[in-house]
Image (tube, coloured by chain):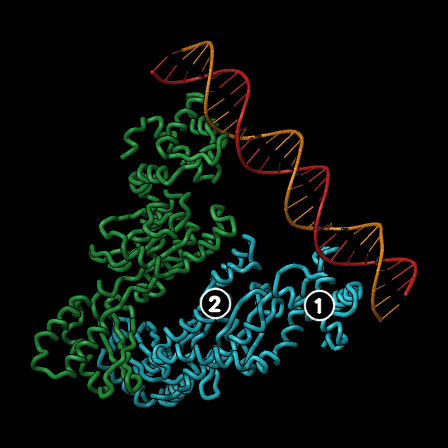
Chain colours: A cyan, B green, C orange, D red
Amino acid sequence: MKNIMLDERAKRVLWAVVESYIEKPEPVGSRYIMKKYGFDVCSATIRNIMSDLEDEGFLFQPHTSAGRVPTDLAYRFYVDYIFEEVLKFRSAEIKKIIENLTKKLRKLRNNMNSLFLETTQNLSQATKYLGLALLPETDKTALHRIDFIKFREDTVIAIVVNDKGIVKNKIIRAIPQITQQELNSLADFVNSNYHGKAFDEIREDLLKRLKKEKIYWDKIISKILKICQQALYFSREDLYISGLYNLMYLPDFCDVEKLRQIAKTIQNRHLLIKLFENIDDEEEIKIIIGEENPFEELRNLSVIASPYKERGKSLGVIALVGPKRMNYERAIMFVNAFAKSLTYTLSE
Amino acid sequence: MKNIMLDERAKRVLWAVVESYIEKPEPVGSRYIMKKYGFDVCSATIRNIMSDLEDEGFLFQPHTSAGRVPTDLAYRFYVDYIFEEVLKFRSAEIKKIIENLTKKLRKLRNNMNSLFLETTQNLSQATKYLGLALLPETDKTALHRIDFIKFREDTVIAIVVNDKGIVKNKIIRAIPQITQQELNSLADFVNSNYHGKAFDEIREDLLKRLKKEKIYWDKIISKILKICQQALYFSREDLYISGLYNLMYLPDFCDVEKLRQIAKTIQNRHLLIKLFENIDDEEEIKIIIGEENPFEELRNLSVIASPYKERGKSLGVIALVGPKRMNYERAIMFVNAFAKSLTYTLSE
DNA sequence: GTTAGCACTTTAAAAGAGGGAGTGCTAAAA
DNA sequence: TTTTAGCACTCCCTCTTTTAAAGTGCTAAC
């Protein structure tokens, strides 16, 4: 890591610059830092340090004779610096947030839709950034029940309820001869054999059956099993997004081009889903700052995401999207607290 | 109507000003009008006419010595003027649009979700405004099938499929004692008695039963019927919205405050749903220009909406939201064509 | 290594100048 | 009575200039 090369004083200066800039989005000068953060060296010394920090890639000068602005590297330094502290020293506050939210969410425990809507709305409301939540991936949940409904001559609607109470449906082009009776017994078959089993397991097992019994059973059966398999696969598409206009009211996005860009990016659900699918489940809180983002379109934003879990297994993530000049302290607290609260609510 | 007071020439001038302004959003001058529209009077005369039009409330001058800009009244005049003509003289074009879209939609006939998504996306794409579609109100559709699924001790999920193949579900807090068996027979009862019947009818009929048989049947039954009734009511919430960023790239919304306002308004789904619920079903195409809008937030926008139908009965609306300075001709064509195409697709 | 001092840079805001587009008015012509 | 020609006037937009403020970088002394 680069910041090993910085001495303690330089770190303090860097930290101060980032904090100042987060507070107010204006280039930070040496005198300001000296006074506000009580350095007992004169501004020229700070100036030298800042110049060094610029050489190291932590600060950036919009033009000679302006103050300095943090680079992504500086935010990364700042976040790494405060991260542990936030979770440790702010635990009381975090606890409070968790308690308040959990109280609200408990009532919505049975209704995932409202639960996640409420969560993202509260998250956005509290932070003034964009709140996001990705619903549990169906494959990581278990089957509660499936129903097949013959809709038109050649169409079957498969309705699947998972153990979270999330209802999903899939339109399937089916063999015309099949009757509702037959579909009912198919559903019975699946429900009695696979209730409570994970979706990916079920699909795998069906595949096995398909291979094994293909020789004995007729074509219709194998086709039906295929339909069934198809009915149990859902790509990830349920993303809750709240508070776009909160983002748009920030001083960081105060020109027309930026606003348009943001709106375009955030409306691109696929992009966001792809991003959050890739969030590493191992990490408790994942922070992606600007250029670190794998997606071009999100490189002038920061993302803070945290998985929510059930019995230790992560189901999905909730996240905050804001400017790079984000109040990371507050943001980390809230994302952490909200993810925990969701985890509690779902595990109760 | 006020414009009865205008003579033919004044109307031509007014029409020209609106058309010019729609073409390019800059105050329109008298000389420009004279030359471009081949008036054989001199600019001073046009000037006098424009001054009269201003007195009548059709035009507005940003400041003395600027050209004139149309008021909402002028747009209304313009739209009333071109409306009939568009549908009459552009019918070939409209037919073409209908054909192309219908070809695309036909494949999605069984999947309402994709169908409406595709429709709004295409509508926005074609016009560069905001495309909207309100799904058929459940109450105006017929029951295809209902299922009750016992989810947790005190929770039942009602899953309803209507005759359009739209699946909706409702979480119901239920009496704890009820078993899945009982729920199944309840579903059987509803399905066999009410398949193909309109939702409002069914609810009404259930209510009648409830009143009539309350005395004989026990409390459980009446409670179940109540649950059932509840399960069959869905408030309107399915609105498809496409192309917010198209709106945001228009020159009409080229400052920060307007962009923020627009984003905030369009994110307000409830508002939009309320607006479109109130659209009069009688009219083939409803046009709401600026101040005519019942909702404050939408008063610097124009809305063009048209119901799509099935067997003469309107099911929902599709709409376009754009700036008041909208290309009404094109917009009317597209909304009209798209609504018709949806109507065909749903009636096939 | 740190400080004081000072010249220098750059921006942002204010002030001024000029040009252009378009109007309103008046008096004459149709 | 309506239309036209002519002209002064208004207002905005753009470009330039000025000024003040903030902050730097450098040098020489501590």
Q: Residue at 49% of width from left, 52% of height from top?
A: B257
The image quadrant of residue A170 is bottom left
Closer to the camera in the image, B318 or B210: B210
Subunit under mark 2: A
Please give left or right for residue B161 compared with residue A83 in the image. Answer: left
Label 1 or label 2, whichever comes before in sequence order? 1
The kind of residue tagged 1 is: Phe
Quadrant holding the N terminus of chain A: bottom right
Say which quarter of the image contains residue B196. bottom left
Going 52% across and 78% down the picture, which residue do you hit?
A93
Left or right side of B56 for A23: right
Q: Secondary structure at mark 1?
A: loop
Q: Secondary structure at mark 2?
A: helix
Q: Which residue is mark 2?
A: A270
Q: Chain of mark 1?
A: A
Q: Across the whole image, how many numbered discs are drawn on residues?
A: 2
- Residue A147 % position (x, y): 29, 80
Residue corresponding to mark 1:
A58
